[in-house]
Image (tube, helix red, strand yellow):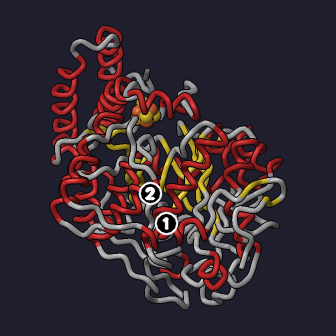
Amino acid sequence: MLPQNKPMNGDLLPVSAEEISRLLEGAAPFRRREALSLLGSLTPRRRLTLPEAARLLATTDPMVWEKAAAMARSVREEIFGRRIVLFAPLYLSNDCVNNCLYCGFRQVNREARRITLSPAQAVREARFLEKKGYHRLLLVSGENPGKTDAEYLAQVLRAIYRETGMRILHVNAAPMPEEELALLKEAGAGVYQVFQETYHPQTYREMHPSGPKADYAWRLTCMDRALRAGFRDVGIGALLGLYDYRFEVLSVIRHAEFLLETHGAFPHTISVPRFKRAFGAPLTRPPRPVSDREFEKIVIVYRLAVPPAGVVVSTREPAALRERVLDIGASQISAGSKTDPGGYTQEARHADSEQFELDDTRPIEEIVRMILGRGYLPSLCTSCYRVDRTGETFTEMATDGHIRGFCLPNALLTLAEYAVAAEDPRLREECLAAVEEGTKEMEGSPLAGAFAQKLARVIAGEKDLFF
Ligand code: SF4
């Protein structure tokens, strides 16, 4: 067994697998009345505690889950209002020295076509996405110390910022030492994302047989190094389907609490990737499948237990489920994604260079329409990262309900900017009608006057105006 909660290079392990197992084993299901009364008391400030999350996950009463879903939606709206943030991943490299059993990028997959984009090629992909209307991208890379190290990632970050209008770039890459993470921060990375994949040490060992990723503790302590290196925002998550999802969810919540206790801020995002089959990966089915119903419960519990976190749902999930989770607490979704490096600017799909198969392949235009149709506001906002509403400040403002006052005008300004540039006249009209409707909600806001002026400037063709 790996040491549990023992220091590692001076860092305490954020999560003790023994503690999580004990919690799970001892968690009694809630009685209905007890659950309804607890759920009814939840707010962004009064969040679901870890033992309560364990008990809720042990509860099967559908009426309890109905109430939990309603509360997750209400907590999300108290924090972020109606906005749903949109982003796209930009895959930089599928060249990887690890051998994760579930991933198509694994080193021993001889059939994979290996691609590492040059900074110039990455700029080309970013430009394509910029034309589509995206302002925030998540750069994703496999782990290859000689090729896709911090120096390479910093070059890509600088090139995209220099040569495109992209407003914020987040990074999902390997765990690194503090000085390399500092280099990425200096180059302008917003959120640093590392998913633990599984928090269960034995399953982790089985899934990651070789390569640097075999080191469970090095991965688990990455966020502490990132925060010491100057990152204010980090993203965590577990790959659902490798082990008992209840264990993973409680571990993610514990990890989030640890970051709050030791660094003063919750993780900025919690992602909910679910196992998908990948070309050339030996694991073709999830060892512990997570059903759609369970997936919904996971989104609900994350929202109630870590209210300020952006709960991120990717295009791995089927369209109908992605739509459903918007009603129960998800706050960010990717759209029109490609998971093969260079995939946006090439005509044909190349399954032999993809990380995994996608399910929701709808383009951003359709996703925007879908979000509007469900009564939410698609948002391409990036303002918080650019005016330092990050880290501890963000956690505080989100918990107090103050972020919502910025999310609404920023969502409306970015939606108006998107509408002005839209090629499809019908989509333009739909977006502008939603902006007009949303503007009514600004009445009474201290920002109402300034907002009206900025909106008029955006409609006249100015870009990148925000609060
Ligand atoms: S105001 Fe901040 S929290 Fe709200 S959408 Fe913009 S960047 Fe996100």
Q: Quadrant of ligand 1?
A: top left
Q: Nearer the viewer, residue 276 or 197?
A: 197
Looking at the rendered image, the quarter that the C terminus falls into is top left
Disc 1: CA contacts within 10 A as few (<14), some (14-19) or many (>=20): some
Residue named by callout 2: 51
Q: Nearer the viewer, residue 245 or 191?
A: 245
Secondary element at tag 2: helix
Report the residue at 31% width, 63% height from top. 297
Q: Is residue 167 left or right of residue 211?
A: left
**Does the closest atom of ligand 1 sit within 8 Å of the Cβ of label 1?**
no
Residue type pointed to by label 1: Leu
Q: Quadrant of residue 102?
A: bottom right
Note whether residue 381 is visible. Answer: no
* Cβ atoms at labels 1 and 2 below 8 Å apart: yes
Residue named by callout 1: 23
Q: Quadrant of residue 190?
A: top right
Q: How many marks?
A: 2
Q: Is residue 427 left or right of residue 248?
A: left
Q: Quadrant of residue 277?
A: bottom left
The location of residue 213, given as percent across then percent down, is 71, 72
Secondary element at tag 1: helix
Note whether residue 330 is visible. Answer: yes
